[in-house]
Amino acid sequence: MNAPRHFLNTQDWSRDGLDALLAEAARYKREVLGDDLRGRSIALLFFNPSMRTRTSFELGAFQLGGHAIVLQPGKDAWPIEFAPGVVMDGDAEEHIAEVAQVLGRYVDLIGVRAFPKFVDWQADREDPVLTAFARHSPVPVINMETITHPCQELAHALALREHFLAAEPGSDPAQVLRGKKYVLTWTYHPKPLNTAVANSALTIATRMGMDVTLLCPTPEYVLDERYMQWARDNAAASGGSLTVSHDIEAAYAGADVVYAKSWGALPYFGKWEPEKPIRERHRHFIVDEAKMALTNNAVFSHCLPLRRNVKATDAVMDSPACIAVNEAENRLHVQKAVMAALLAGRR
């Protein structure tokens, strides 16, 4: 597979390239151990906390014969400056220009997890940390979640394929999701969260030819226009569709997939107090048994972590329809596929 240099967004990859990654991930799920990364290494830089991402990347590298080094800039590594041309008289001890180049001489891959600063969306939407690493690094860079979460996208797509292939034996894995009704629903959370997983779910579901409904409380919760346009373009190319809805019953009706996520309204980005009353009025967006009963026996998932009985009820989470744990497991397998693809043919 002729892969792009980095794995920053699935939108940068062709549909054939994504299908090849998913096929490799399925193989790694069957054949856990291998030597595709033997003698190779990856530096995992965590600017934010992690459980699934760190565990799955470290373990994935190990299972393929590689080695992962975990770094937390500002904690066990020096604070880093990312702005060009800055006078470094603040807290940062070194510049990304040196950090990326030095790491690139030690390791074969660099993974970056860096959430938005939650001050100015116009600044955060440029993804400054990830793009700086990609610009300066001599080795491939992997997005471990910034303002998108492409590894989660692949894990989600693989889990959905597995579910529908089991229900429709003999189907083409690359086509089995086409035409399925997919509901990406906002849910309440006591804090305004990153839009990364919602951006990514919208991207991958439309890429796979699904009929996607973005369900959110008010127009203020519609996602950034960049990702809305990606979704519209994907739907046009894949034969799927995109609908925005604020009507719970209409959105759930006949759904084949319900994917839940909470996110903050971008018009209030960095000024969350005015948004809080809006969020509080829409606690009823929780995924519960009554809403799932409106669907076409839909499968339910979430990226995790999930606050039970806030985002989804115990009954939904514990039902056979919930594939959230399967999706989380698939992070291990898709990340192996990404690492191996980026290093294929490179020394």
Image (cartoon, rainbow, N blue to C red):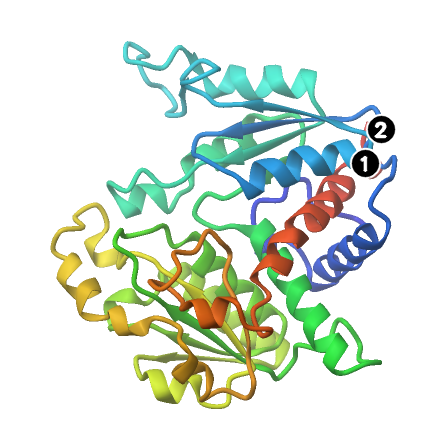
**Residue 198, quarter of the rendered image:** bottom left
Q: Quadrant of the C terminus?
A: top right
SS state under label 2: loop
SS state under label 1: loop
**Residue 32, quarter of the rendered image:** top right
Give percent across and percent down for residue 139. Answer: 67, 28
Instruction: Indicate which disc, 2 or 1, sits on the residue closer to the N terminus.
Output: 2
Give percent across and percent down for residue 255. Answer: 51, 84
C-alpha distance separating marks 2 and 1: 6 Å
| Residue for badge 2 | 38
Image height of 324 relative to 33, above or below = below
Name the residue at 57% across, 41% down.
Answer: 53
Which residue occupies the foreground of this view, 45 or 28? 28
* Residue 41 visible, this orientation: yes
Name the residue at 68% across, 40% down.
Answer: 5
Name the residue at 64% across, 49% down.
Answer: 331
**Residue 321, quarter of the rendered image:** bottom right
Tell me which amino acid carries mark 2. Answer: Arg
Query: Within 10 angstroms of label 2, few (less than 14), some, or many (20 or more) residues?
Result: some
Q: Is the C-beta separation of discs 2 and 1 under 8 Å?
A: yes
Give percent across and percent down for residue 334. Answer: 70, 50
Name the residue at 79% across, 59% down.
Answer: 23
Tell me which amino acid carries mark 1. Answer: Leu
- Residue 80 in the figure: left or right of residue 210: left
| Residue for badge 1 | 64
* Residue 175 visible, this orientation: no
